[in-house]
Image (spheres, rainbow, N blue to C red):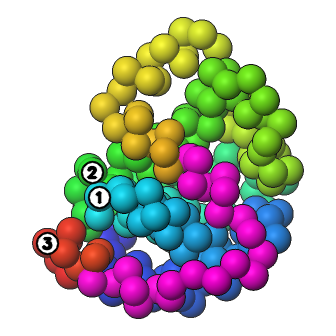
C-alpha cells in the first residue's frame, strides 16, 4: 500500500498508543523520544524522520504486536522501509531497513551491548537471527547507510523512558513534508 506523509502521521497517532514489544512505553512515545534524540545530536532531517518512523513497520497493515513472543519475525524493518522509501526515499528508508541488523552488529562488535538491551529487544533479537558473526558484521558495516543505522539503533535503545516529556507529533510534521515529494 502507498502512504502519504499525512497517512503515516495519522497511523502513528491512531495506532501509536498501543504497546511496544513488551516495553514500558507506547509506540508513539518511543518514536517521539527517538526523533528527539536525533534532533539533539544535530542529525539531518532524513535521520530525524527515520528515527521517528523506524518502527512504522509494526503498525502498517494488521500490525505485528506479540509475534516476537511467539517466535515469529515479522520483519518490521523491511515492511517499514518499503513504505518509507516510497514517501521519503532511501536516506530515510535505508537506516530503517538496517536498524535491526545494526542491533545484531552491535551485539557482535561491542562488549556489554547485549547486556544493555531491554528484555523486549533481547526477545526480538532471538527471532531476528541473533548477534552477527565476524563475517556478517564486516559485511554490514560496509553497507551504505550502516553508520546512520547504528546511530538510529542507539536512539532506539535509549528511547524507552516512561513519562519522558517530548515534542508532540505535529512538531515533526513540517520536517517530514520537506523531505517528501507527496506531502
Q: Residues within 10 Å of mark 3 (few under 14, many from 20)?
A: few
Between the C-alphas of marks 1 and 3, the distance is 17 Å
The residue that disc 2 covers is 91
The residue that disc 1 covers is 44
Instruction: Give above or below for 2 relative to 83.
Output: below
Residue that lies at the very extreme toward the left in this rendered image? 181
Whether pointer 1 and pointer 3 mark residues with C-beta atoms closer than 8 Å, the reply is no
The N terminus, quarter of image: bottom left
Between the C-alphas of marks 2 and 1, the distance is 10 Å
Instruction: Give above or below for 127 relative to 49.
Output: above
Q: Is residue 44 left or right of residue 65?
A: left
The residue that disc 3 covers is 181
Q: Nearer the viewer, mark 1 or mark 3?
A: 1
Instruction: Residue at 46% x, 64% y: name it.
Output: 40
Instruction: Give above or below for 13 relative to 43.
Output: below
Q: Nearer the viewer, mark 2 or mark 1?
A: 1
Question: Percent from the top left, x then y, of residue 59?
Answer: 57, 71
Counting residues from the start of the chain, the first of labels 2 and 1 encountered is: 1
Counting residues from the start of the chain, the first of labels 1 and 3 encountered is: 1
- In depth, the one of 108 and 100 nearer the eye is 108
Extent of the magenta region: 153-174
Q: Is residue 43 magenta?
A: no
Amino acid at each position: 500500500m502507498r502512504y502519504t506523509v499525512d497517512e503515516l502521521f495519522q497511523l502513528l497517532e491512531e495506532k501509536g498508543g498501543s504497546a511496544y514489544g513488551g516495553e514500558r512505553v507506547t509506540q508513539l512515545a518511543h518514536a517521539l523520544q527517538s526523533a528527539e534524540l536525533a534532533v539533539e545530536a544535530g542529525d539531518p532531517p532524513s535521520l530525524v524522520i527515520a528515527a521517528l518512523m523506524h518502527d512504522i513497520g509494526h503498525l502498517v497493515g494488521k500490525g505485528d504486536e506479540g509475534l516476537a513472543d511467539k517466535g515469529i519475525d515479522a520483519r518490521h524493518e523491511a515492511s517499514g522501509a518499503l513504505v518509507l522509501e516510497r514517501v521519503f526515499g532511501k536516506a530515510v528508508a535505508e537506516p530503517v531497513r538496517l536498524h535491526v541488523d545494526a542491533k545484531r552488529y552491535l551485539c557482535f562488535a561491542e562488549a556489554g551491548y547485549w547486556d544493555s538491551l531491554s528484555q523486549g529487544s533481547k526477545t526480538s533479537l532471538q527471532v531476528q537471527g541473533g548477534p552477527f558473526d565476524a563475517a556478517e558484521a564486516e559485511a554490514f558495516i560496509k553497507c551504505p547507510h550502516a553508520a546512520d543505522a547504528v546511530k538510529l539503533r542507539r536512539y532506539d535503545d535509549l528511547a524507552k523512558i516512561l513519562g519522558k516529556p517530548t515534542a508532540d507529533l505535529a512538531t515533526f510534521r513540517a520536517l517530514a513534508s520537506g523531505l517528501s515529494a507527496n506531502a
